[in-house]
Image (cartoon, rainbow, N blue to C red):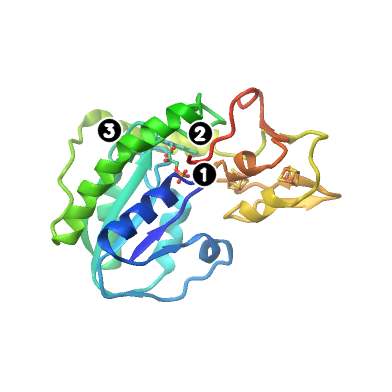
Amino acid sequence: MILFFSGTGNSAFVARKLARKIQDEYMNVFDRIKHEDYGEIHSEKPFVIVCPTYGWQMPHFLEEWMEKVTFTGSKEMYFMLTCGSDIGNAGKYAKEFCARKEMIYRGCAEVVMPENYIAMFPVPNKEESELIVKKAVPVIEKLAYYIEVGRPFPKYKTGVVNWIKSAPVNKVFYGIFVHAKKFTVDDSCIGCGKCERVCPLNNVELENGKPKWGDHCTHCMACICDCPREAIEYGKRSIGKPRYHCP
Ligand SMILES: Cc1cc2nc3c(=O)[nH]c(=O)nc-3n(C[C@H](O)[C@H](O)[C@H](O)COP(=O)(O)O)c2cc1C
Ligand code: SF4
Ligand code: SF4
């Protein structure tokens, strides 16, 4: 079974593509996370976790949710992390997660997709995104093959740079950069509540018809990218940037 989380659609795309290829079912874990549902998840086939890379690891909130879930049936677990450039040493943490959960680690693979982090970096426009997604398709198909034939994903190169990214830089990244203090909303907001609905961590609430952000944001970029009026900005960083959705 493929379990996926996606802030802006990349991982959803990869999960669906993979599901078609390996003829397996997929589950969007968004509702479960949002409603703090830790109920058992059963699959006779290996579990495949598909998610974005945040700070060169799988998202912490996803890992924390998975820690509390009981996985039954297959003991095998694959990880497919979508990313804008690379996943650093993310496999180490996925492997440690499996050890804690008594699951069999079957590897962690990266799928380069368009960058979605509009609060920090430039993001590609629609045409550029389409090209990147096109290039990702054979990568997904190759990884699907490994799952189909029951082989672990090929090992990828790790080294000191990747260690630095996923360990100390990840810590600094979460400690300093990941917060909702810089979100603002302008007068074009129509109070539709979409930003509230799409937040996996219930960190957005409408107050007098306008969003207010709490203090447990994970920077998934769903609220800012999904607003139908583009009424949300993140400090000055997001101004003028196209809102990202997987094409
Ligand atoms: C908070 C945050 C952190 C990110 N960290 C990384 C990273 O460490 N390496 C990388 O290559 N891409 C990084 N990205 C880019 C995303 O992982 C990438 O665009 C991903 O495919 C988005 O998936 P989604 O559309 O399913 O949410 C980051 C994006 C966000 C929002
Ligand atoms: S999604 Fe946009 S328009 Fe809708 S309530 Fe949120 S900020 Fe306002
Ligand atoms: S507040 Fe916005 S960016 Fe932060 S977790 Fe919620 S939807 Fe994602």
Q: Is residue 239 left or right of residue 100?
A: right
Q: Is mark 2 within 8 Å of ligand 1?
A: yes
**Mark 2 element type:** loop
Is the CB of mark 1 within 8 Å of ligand 1?
A: yes
Q: Residue at x 75, y 46 (%)?
A: 212
The image quarter containing residue 48 is bottom left
Query: Earlier along the polypeptide chain: callout 1 or callout 2?
Result: 1
Cα distance between the residues tagged 1 and 2: 10 Å
Q: Is residue 105 above or below residue 224?
A: below
Whichever of callouts 3 and 1 sits on the residue coming sooner in the sequence is 1
* Front position among marks 3 and 2: 2
Nearest to viewer (mark 3 / mark 1)? 1
The span from disc 3 to disc 2 (Cα, nearest Å) is: 20 Å
| Mark closer to the observer (1, 2) | 1
Whether ligand 1 has any atom under 8 Å from the Cβ at mark 3 is answered as no
Residue behind mark 3: 162
Is 58 in front, or is 145?
Answer: 145
Residue 101 drawn above or below residue 183: below
Image coordinates of residue 145 in percent, x first then y, are 18, 54
> What kind of residue is marked 3?
Asn
Three-letter amino acid code at the position of disc 2: Tyr
For label 2, the residue is: 117
The disc, 3 or 2, on the residue closer to the chain's N-terminal end is 2
Tell me where residue 137 sits by quadrant.
top left
Asked whether 113 or 159 is in front, the reply is 113
- Residue at 58 percent across and 29 percent down: it is 242
Check disc 1 and report the residue beneath it. Answer: 8
Question: Which quadrant of the picture is home to ligand 2?
Answer: top right
Q: Residue 16 location in percent, x, y?
A: 38, 55
Tell me if label 3 and label 2 are in contact, CB under 8 Å. Answer: no
